[in-house]
Amino acid sequence: MLAVRNLRKDFATIRAVDDVSFDIGRGEIFGLLGPNGAGKTTAIRIVLNILEADGGTITYDGRPFSGALRNQIGYLPEERGLYRKSKLLDTILYLAEIRGMKRAKARDEALRWLRRFDLLTYQERKVEELSKGNQQKIQFITSIIHDPVLVVLDEPFSGLDPVNQILFQEALRELKQAGKAIIFSTHQMDQAEKLSDTLCLINKGKVVLGGTVRDVKRRYGSNSLHVEFQGDGSFMTSLAGVRRAMIYENAAELDLAPDARIQDILKAMIGKVEIRKFELLEPSLQSIFIETVGIPAGGTMLQGAA
């Protein structure tokens, strides 16, 4: 559906996007990942024809961007873009009509989505009266209400609590099943791992990793130890055989050296913490992100002894 080839964008002395290429098909959720400032949003704005590229090509089903294509795209930007003084329903209907929807159909769809997101009783309230999470719901509704072919979501989970994150996940999976091509841009690796079929990791404007989630994780092996525990796990960074440790409140992900002995690591933990789960598995996207980009991406990353 969407083919991006050798995309390049310069701002003064900074190359924000440097030779970026990827493909997205219908019925696919594509994770465009990277740390803050990596070039994700710039790439998205070029795809949407908001910015002009300095090099490369973008085609939609083999054709360049055109005005006729504009209403076939849904876009949820990272920044809030709603009219704060307008009422919820009026805002949704206005933006739906701009995208070519008839008012009656737009109203039916708007009420359906408001009901689904538990906002039906808020329809006459002003946008500024809503919480950040509920404003994000409205932005999402306005980005998909016109039944677009390509859906572009830039940090869609921003401001959402865990319950509403699940609602969004369900909505994205339904859009996928309906055959939409979805670009899902984020630096939240846990969400990307749950939702993405394929991914592209950008750092400093360049693609540093890409492919299906399964292939990417296989490429990084399966020598990752996940531990859930009660107590102080900071000692795990100094365990023999641990190359790198990501320590959280009651869990840790340990990247092991090739010659590490699982039995020795378990033995060293007994008596220091109460172990609730001890499992060898594939590395998470979070740990792959850190290994590839080289900076923390949430939680605490501590170096261990190899």
Image: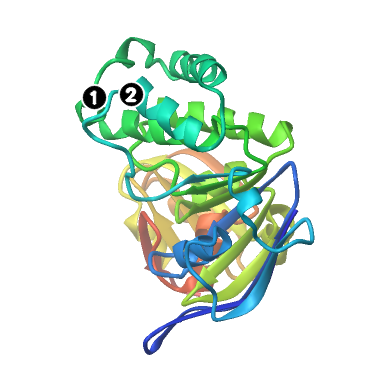
Tell me where residue 35 appears, x and y as whole percent.
Answer: 43, 65
Tell me where residue 191 appears, x and y as whole percent.
Answer: 51, 44
| 299 to 112, vertically: above or below | below
- The amino acid sitting under disc 2 is Leu
Q: What residue is at 48 percent from the left and 20 percent from the top?
A: 110
Q: What residue is at 42 percent from the left and 41 percent from the top?
A: 157
- Which one is earlier in the sequence, the residue at label 1 or at label 2? 2
The answer to whether 92 appears left or right of 80 in the picture is: right
- The amino acid sitting under disc 1 is Lys
Tell me where residue 175 appears, x and y as whole percent.
Answer: 65, 33
Regarding residue 217, the answer to whether it shows in the image is yes
Mark 1–mark 2 distance (CA, rounded to whole Å): 6 Å
Q: Name the residue under label 1.
A: 126
Q: Mark 2 points at which residue?
A: 88
| 32 to 58, vertically: above or below | above
Are there few (<14), some (14-19), or many (20+) residues within 10 Å of tag 2? many
Are there few (<14), some (14-19), or many (20+) residues within 10 Å of tag 1? some
